[in-house]
Amino acid sequence: MTSASNGQAAIIRTERGLTISGTRITLYDVMDYVTAQYPAKFIRGLFNLTDEQMNAALVYIEANRAEVEAEYQIVLKEAEELRQYYAQRNRDLIARLATKPRKPDMEAAWEKLQAQKAKH
């Protein structure tokens, strides 16, 4: 792990995990795009990172690939477990909401939404 004592971009461990110093962006956020092979310039722009911050993240990932990958897999597993939990928890609510009649003043908005969905 590198230090941020000299004011330069670094990777630090916080309660959220490995994080780019001066941001709330974790390396796991970056890993989603690195593993999908997005270009560094795109990732940098997406998270509004400086070149120095982006380079620090990529260098750290490459230098500690096994550790970062292991933690990333744990994060993905926990995220999937949370997704399943909330999908199950909200299943009844979503079913109840689907059966409720739409408000008359929202009909135009609903039709517009359906038209947009049909386009895509």
Image (cartoon, grey):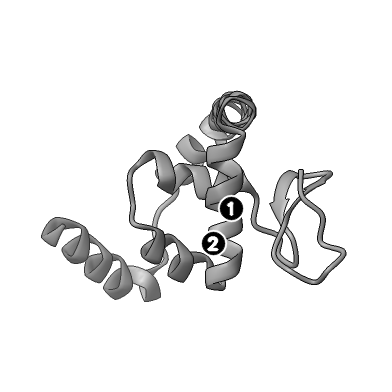
Image quarter of residue 23: bottom right
Q: On screen, 48 above or below 88?
A: below
**Image point 48% across, 45% down: which residue?**
97
The numbered disc on residue 99 is none
**Image point 62% across, 34% down: which residue?**
64
Is residue 49 in view from this perspective? no
24 or 116: which is nearer to us?
24
**Image point 12% across, 61% down: which residue?**
119
The numbered disc on residue 54 is 2
Mark 1 Cα shell of 10 Å, populated few (<14), some (14-19), many (≥20): many
Mark 2: amino acid: Met
The residue labelled by disc 1 is: 57
Gap between marks 2 and 1, in whole Å?
5 Å
Image quarter of residue 93: top right
The image position of residue 109, as x and y in percent, is 32, 73
The image position of residue 94, as x and y in percent, is 49, 40
Image quarter of residue 46: bottom left
Q: On screen, 43 above or below 36?
A: below
75 or 69: which is nearer to us?
69
The image position of residue 15, as x and y in percent, is 83, 44
- The N terminus, quarter of image: top right
